Each structure stands twice: as structure tokens, then as C-alpha cells.
Image (tube, helix red, strand yellow):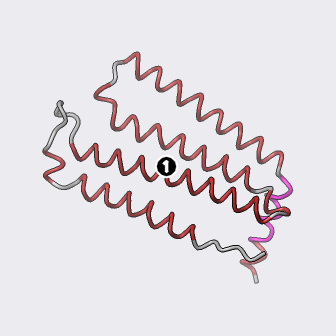
Amino acid sequence: MNTNWIWIGKFLIVIAAALVLGEVLGSLELFKSTTLGTPKVTAGSLVRFFAHTGALVLLLMLGQRLAQQLRATGGGTARLADPVLALITLIVTASAYVVLINFSTPFLGHGVKTMLDWTFILGILAAAVWLVWALFQNFEAVVEAIGKSTRAKTE
């Protein structure tokens, strides 16, 4: 089965472009000096929030598509889909907390922030448990993929 993997590059380029544009636009003086109701929140922080959120959504979409394509290939490679999706979910969940807290801290009271912290703690732990379970369930496929990768590097 000849599977085209070029779409991964498209996702990675768009994710990088979103992050770079968010930083460049967010650092412009116009965006740094324009506030959103409170001096602590600027248009630059809003631009960064949208850019980082967009990049995380695209990363999650990349993970879902990658898992779908791995399943479509069949064989041992298909068993890598669950660990890959679990890993990307863990990365996105942990990163989403940082993105959200960096932007929303000026708006949050102590009680709301504590609730948000615990919500993300539970989400991150759930994603970590899923990753460990997926690795346990698909251990042979993961070891085989690592073995193929190291053999390819030595050849």
C-alpha cells in the first residue's frame, strides 16, 4: 500500500507559521500598547493567545489524521495509532493549560483559577494514563517501530 505522508509537512508549516506570526504581531508596538479593558491584557497577548490556540488545534488535528492514516496502513503499524494519539493529546492538554493561564490570569479570581488548575490536572492525568495504557496495550508494535528506526539509522 503506497500511502502519501506529505500532508504532515503542510500541518507542520502552518503550525510554525501560526506561532511565528503570533509572536511577530504580538510584539509590534501597536499591539503591545493597545489594552483590552485592563492594562494587564494587551492586543498582543490576545494575538498570541489566538495563535497558540490555533497551533494547538492544528496539532490535535495532525494527531487525529496521523492516527487515522496509521490505522489505514494495517498490520503492526496500525497498532501505533493509539499511542501516537494519546501522546499528542497529552502534549496538547498540558500546553493548552499554559496558553490559557498566560492569557486569562488577569481575569480570574483565586477560586476560578483553582478550579481551572484542578480541571487541567485531571485532564493531564487522564491523558497520561491513556498514554501509559496505550503503550502497554501496543508495546510490541512500539518496540518494533523503534527497532526499525534504529536499524534504518545504522544502515
Picture residue at 34% right of the left edge, 19% below the top: 109
Bin the neighbour count of mark 1 within 10 Å (Cα to Cα): few under 14, some 14-19, many 20 and up: some
Relative to 54, say whether 42 is above or below.
above
Picture residue at 30% right of the left edge, 56% below the top: 23
| Place of residue 48 in the rendered image (x, y in percent of width and height, measured from the top left) | 32, 48
Specify the quadrant that holds the C terminus: bottom right
- 78 sits to left or right of 90: right
Specify the quadrant that holds the N terminus: bottom right
Considering depth in this image, is 4 or 144 the residue closer to the camera? 4
Asked which quadrant contains residue 65, the reply is: bottom right
Residue picked out by circle 1: 57
Q: Is residue 148 magenta?
A: yes
| Place of residue 60 in the rendered image (x, y in percent of width and height, measured from the top left) | 55, 50
- 43 sits to left or right of 151: left
Picture residue at 16% right of the left edge, 34% below the top: 39
Specify the segment rendered in magenta. Answer: 139-149
Considering depth in this image, is 77 or 122 the residue closer to the camera? 77
Asked which quadrant contains residue 79, the reply is: bottom right
Asked which quadrant contains residue 81, the reply is: bottom right
- 4 sits to left or right of 121: right
